[in-house]
Amino acid sequence: MRTPVSAAATVVAAVAAVTVAAGCSSTEDANTEKVVVGYQSKTINTVTAGTLLRSRGDFEKRLGELAGKRYKVEWQDYDTGAPITTGMVAGKIDIGSMGDYPLLINGSRANSNPATATSILSVTGSSPKGSLNSVIAKPDSTVNSLRDLRGKKVSASVGSAGHGTLLAGLNQAGIPASAVNVSNQQPQVGASALESGSVDALAQFVAWPGLLVFQKKAKLVYDGGRLGYPTLHGVIARNQYVAKHPDVIKAFLQAQLDATKALAGDPLAAARLVSKESGLPAEVVYLYNGPGGTDFNPAIKPALVDALAGDRPYLKSIGSFPNPVDLGTFINDGPLKAAVTATGGDYAALLSRAGNASKADSEVWYSGDETATVASATELLKLVKAARAAGKSITAAYITDPVVGTRWFADHAVWLRDGGDFRAFTTADSAQEYRKQHPTAVPVDYSRAVQEVGS
């Protein structure tokens, strides 16, 4: 776990991070209130309540509109949701954001006592099929699918969304969890372990799989989208804080809406800003927040509530869910409805809105701010070929897996050629599934596909 970092709100001067007593929104003076927000700077699914929100200053701007007091925001950055939960239970963090499994663990721990109880207030990012979590292995590994993990050692943060996807995927493949040796590690520790060879695979949430693949340190062996089961991240807050400071909660959710609108309006600019603040390559951030990537709709849709209910067996299996929460009371979308209404929005419309859909199948990001979206992987290859012929630099190229719908790096995809038509897939499993229905399709690597595609 990294040392928490503090950033000043625009309405007051910067201060160092400090430990505060229970009921942590302590008063510095009669007119200054401190708000502590726990977030994960490298978790792309939470940027609208974390990295992007912080870097844009949306929360501080909204707080500045409140009359009667000044507010100081203390941002605490963590690698996973577990330490945020610990801080909230201790009364040292007011508002946090984390993934689906950690959210439920938070509720299980916090809601055993009314004094520490918490509620989910909004969604920060979701995927209808679960493509936000993945399993990766070293590029030269013989592990090419979950079936190859029997008797192997896999790094995962136990209780995280990535760990949950691993166990669900093993179950779907008919492989008992006991057949795999799970090493409980923080994401960055697991990444180092994979690189050194001390583990055979790494199961994590975004952006870790995409980052390591982009850096050519790993290959994707399991795409969580194959589960076909929704995954999400969301905002959670202490109930006592929500009741005592409804205006601050409203300001936070309005700020989340501001950041979400900015991301949707210019995802490339948002990716660059998140990259600057988090240290992640902009190409990796844009993989997830570009067209067809993470759905940043803040509404708590019924399908996502059902998904949370379906996560309970996993949590019980790892002993992290001793007091299952009542989702009917644990989920509180009242403050979000109020924030949406106050900003001129329609919450019912958000509930019915489709995800981060794109009519385009593929996208090329040329150097600079220019991007081009096309309807197929074949057309993408033509763009890349033309750019190379013209000496035009390409920052990144992205495809969409036709089997699971996951957006991925074109140069790290599994490619097939069927006559003059080319298809790209996230994993060998997806490509194999496609070939069952298209037996004339044959494997081809990316560089050769670029050479062979027609003009």
Image (cartoon, rainbow, N blue to C red):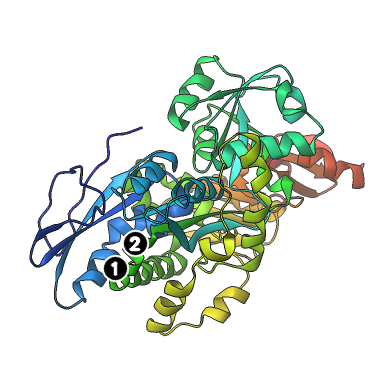
Distance, label 2 to label 1, CA atoms, is 6 Å
**351 versus 16 height, above or below:** below
* Between 317 and 449, the one nearer to me in the picture: 317
Which quadrant of the view contains residue 236? bottom left
Amino acid at the residue labelled 2: Gln
Q: Residue at x 49, y 42 (%)?
A: 207
Which quadrant of the view contains residue 336? bottom left
Q: Residue at x 41, y 42 (%)?
A: 281
Circles 2 and 1: CB atoms closer than 8 Å: yes
| Residue furthest to the left | 29
Q: Can you give x and y, in whole percent of width and height, for residue 383 in the image?
A: 61, 53
Q: Is residue 13 visible?
A: yes
Q: According to the image, label 2 marks what residue? A: 240
Q: Can you give x and y, in whole percent of width and height, for residue 341 in the image?
A: 43, 83
Q: Can you give x and y, in whole percent of width and height, for residue 415 in the image?
A: 73, 40
* Between 215 and 78, the one nearer to me in the picture: 78
Q: According to the image, label 1 marks what residue? A: 244
Classify mark 1: residues with Cα within 10 Å, few (<14), some (14-19) or many (20+). few
Amino acid at the residue labelled 1: Lys
